[in-house]
Image (cartoon, rainbow, N blue to C red):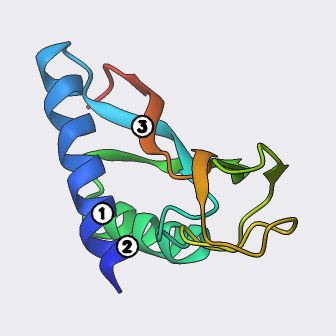
Amino acid sequence: MHEMSLMGDILQLVHEDAAAKGIGRIEKVEIIVGEISNAMPDALRMAFAIFREQNPDLFSEAAELVIHLEEAKAECVLCGRQYKPDQKIALCPSCQIPSGKVITGETFQVLSYEGSNRQ
């Protein structure tokens, strides 16, 4: 499950930024996950819960992970039709050719986080 590694990287970045700003405890982390980003939201939630339990000094007891799902959209470079792909390389529903350019749905990033100075 690579989501454990992804969540570890996200939380390391958040922790470093929070420490630089004098924030002692993380209360909320918001991320954007694209439908075809190869990251599974449920696995990310589970990884977050594990990290929260293992790091009580870093997280408040009620710390939460908020995931905003980004819908996948692609546009065929041959006919111009926009469609919803189910994976990064998908057939255009009009041309039946894998000529789509992904417009949205691949994002995986931290949107924001909240914390407090409480230790």
- Left or right: 11, with 82 as reference point: left
Q: Residue at x 18, y 47 (%)?
A: 12
Relative height, residue 37 to residue 22 (above, below)? below
Q: Is residue 57 visible?
A: no
Q: Amino acid at mark 2?
A: Glu
Classify 104 as above or below 115.
Answer: below
| Label whose residue precedes the other's in the sequence (2 or 3) | 2
Across and down, in percent, residue 7 comes to: 33, 61
Identified by mark 1, the residue type is Leu
Q: CA distance from mark 2 to mark 3?
A: 14 Å
In the image, residue 103 sits, relative to residue 5, either above or below, namely above
| Residue designated by label 1 | 6
What's the distance in space between the residues labelled 1 and 3, CA to CA? 11 Å
* C-alpha separation, residue under disc 1 versus residue under disc 2: 5 Å
**Disc 1 crowd, CA 10 A, few/some/many (<14, 14-19, 20+):** some
Callout 3: SS: strand
- Residue 17 in sight from this viewpoint: yes
